[in-house]
Image (tube, grey):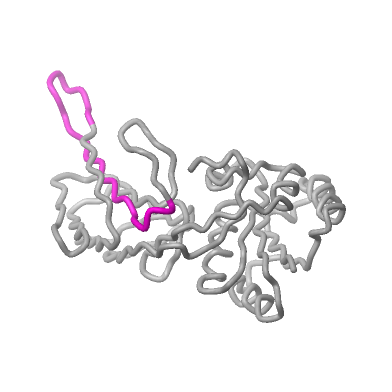
């Protein structure tokens, strides 16, 4: 049984034609199902868990990375499959990483049901599939697997990665290796005033980040704030429908 979770922004009239085409294709493929439409004052976690209790086996986020994060948080420790149909141009990094195209084509990928069992990251009580980003962090201490501590001497950017593409200074983050990657980027000055970035990458199963002041961050695009963050890798926590164009 499929259960489709429509984010609030998808219900905008500008998406009406695309949404109608997707619903028709899902019916043609025999994978139509019950629909939940999220709204400001509806708790997505309770809606989804209620449907799982009623027998839903595949939960599909229709929206963007933020929608998918809400679904993943709700299905933790449940024996279900997670899928995604991306909408809009913003906040769809995860859709690209798991090989999920936009539009009607995503329905065929869902129907093919290529499943991957992926790790999740958790920061305090929040689960995430992709990354946690904290920028311009100062007076911070990073404890890595209770083995050693990193204390950047300048304001820095900290990125904790579970599933991510390679960048100029870091490799791809593998969401099947049972670890997170803590990436610390500290700006430095070289001769003639040119700016350089010193990058440190540490694979961890657990990390604690403590700051003397409140830090703003985002987990898969969802904002949060605090001064202590406990990160853990949760191996093989979620089964996700992926496309052949997945990036891992």
Total marks drawn?
0
For residue 180, side relative to residue 243 (left or right): left
Q: Residue at x 66, y 41 (%)?
A: 101
Is residue 190 a member of the stretch shown in magenta?
Answer: yes
Q: In the rendered image, which quarter is residue 157 located in?
A: top left
For residue 78, side relative to residue 226 (left or right): right
Q: Could you say which is closer to the camera, residue 20 or residue 180? A: 180
Is residue 95 a member of the stretch shown in magenta?
Answer: no
User: Which span is picked out in magenta?
Assistant: 175-196
Residue 108: x percent and y percent? 75, 47
Q: Is residue 99 shown above or below 4? A: above
Residue 187: x percent and y percent? 22, 36
Q: Is residue 238 shown above or below 51? A: above
Residue 137: x percent and y percent? 26, 51
Q: Is residue 15 shown above or below 206? A: above
Residue 36: x percent and y percent? 73, 68
């Amino acid at each position: 049984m499929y259960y489709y979770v429509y984010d609030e922004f998808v219900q905008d009239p500008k998406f009406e034609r695309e949404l109608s085409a997707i619903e028709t294709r899902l019916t043609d493929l025999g994978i139509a199902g019950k629909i939940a439409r999220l709204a400001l004052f509806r708790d997505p976690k309770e809606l989804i868990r209620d449907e799982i209790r009623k027998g839903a086996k595949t939960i599909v986020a229709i929206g963007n990375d933020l929608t998918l994060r809400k679904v993943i948080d709700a299905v933790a420790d449940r024996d279900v499959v997670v899928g995604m149909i991306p909408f809009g141009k913003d906040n769809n990094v995860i859709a690209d990483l798991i090989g999920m195209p936009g539009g009607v084509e995503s329905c065929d990928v869902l129907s093919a049901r290529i499943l991957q069992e992926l790790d999740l990251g958790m920061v305090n009580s929040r689960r995430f599939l992709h990354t946690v980003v904290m920028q311009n962090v100062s007076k911070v201490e990073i404890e890595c697997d209770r083995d050693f501590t990193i204390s950047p001497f300048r304001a820095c950017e900290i990125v904790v990665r579970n599933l991510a593409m390679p960048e100029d200074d870091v490799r791809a983050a593998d969401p099947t290796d049972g670890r997170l990657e803590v990436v610390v980027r500290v700006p430095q000055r070289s001769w003639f005033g040119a700016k350089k970035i010193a990058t440190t990458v540490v694979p961890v199963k657990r990390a604690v980040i403590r700051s003397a002041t409140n830090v703003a961050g985002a987990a898969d695009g969802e904002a949060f704030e605090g001064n202590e963050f406990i990160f853990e890798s949760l191996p093989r926590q979620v089964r996700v429908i992926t496309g052949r164009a997945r990036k891992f």
